[in-house]
Amino acid sequence: MSEKDLLCVQDLHFAYNGEGRPVVDGVSLRLGRGEVLAVLGPNGAGKTTLLHTLLGILKPQSGRIWLEGRELSACTRGEISRLVGLVPQFEHVAFEYSVEEYVLMGRAPHLGMLELPSEDDSRLAVESLDQLGLLALRHRSMLELSGGERQMVVLARALAQQARLLLMDEPLAHLDLSNKGRILAAIHRLSDAGVAVVFTTHEPDMVQGVADSVLLMREGRVVASGRTEMVLTSETLSQTYGVGIRVLHVDGVSVVRLEAML
């Protein structure tokens, strides 16, 4: 493990109930500060499970995870929650919180027991909404939002948390092109600020220009990993998804297409 690594994963194995075929099978990766890693693969590839092991929600049967040079297993939940943020693919909101109240919850890992948010915490929550163009929603109920709006607010909560590593599970799913652009722009800003980002996606085209590196997974195993331009090839994507895929180069931009569409 290098001193520059914010996150280091070595030969990770995880199976639910500790039995059967591993859902994560021998995954290794390294991520430095400000680096962006995209994890691609078909449904059931183990992408979400991998994120949950990195967050410490799931305990692997074998393998090791280091976060800022410390083994994740030696970190307390409070320490992990201050260092690592999660943007889940879907989160159920049971109560009628306002958008601003919900985003303010991102400051909880930095507060003591029974400590109320400060003016600085409130300012950070508002700034996070502003970064994503969501200020107009700040007084709206979370229960009134569309699915796409809610996903953007979940990201705003993660921004308010000010984690050093952000894990995003399918952050582009169910979003229109405008909101996808906002998400990708937010990832760029986080990277520029030194925050490392791991995000899963089904959209190879969206990885171009935002991810420094890519991890391709199939049935829990790594098909290929490395720099984005080296990994996203016709051969590796076809092997990952089990269908014919062509990567075309148009005006210096890589475009991913199913062979049936050509």
Image: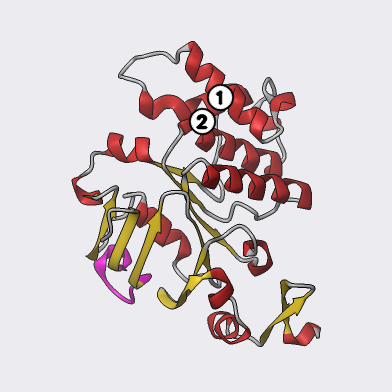
Q: Give the magenta part as a residue range.
A: 13-24
Check residue 160 in the rendering and tell me which mark sits there, or answer none.
2
The verdict on residue 16 being magenta is yes
Q: Return the x and y of residue 153 as percentages of the image width and height.
A: 62, 35
Q: Residue at x 80, y 82 (%)?
A: 261
Q: Secondary structure at mark 1?
A: helix
Q: Secondary structure at mark 2?
A: helix
* Amino acid marked by disc 1: Ala
Disc 1 to disc 2: CB gap under 8 Å: yes
Label 2 Cα neighbours within 10 Å, binned few <14 / some 14-19 / many ≥20: many
Label 1 Cα neighbours within 10 Å, binned few <14 / some 14-19 / many ≥20: many
In which quadrant will I find the N terminus? bottom left
* Amino acid marked by disc 2: Ala
The Cα–Cα distance between marks 1 and 2, rounded to whole angstroms, is 5 Å
* Vertical position of residue 64 compared to residue 83: above or below: below
Q: Residue at x 65, y 54 (%)?
A: 172
Q: Nearer the viewer, residue 138 or 147?
A: 138
Q: Return the x and y of residue 178 as percentages of the image width and height.
A: 77, 47
Q: Residue at x 37, y 25 (%)?
A: 110
Q: Nearer the viewer, residue 184 or 99?
A: 184
Determine if residue 218 is in view. Answer: no
Give the residue pinned by disc 1: 125
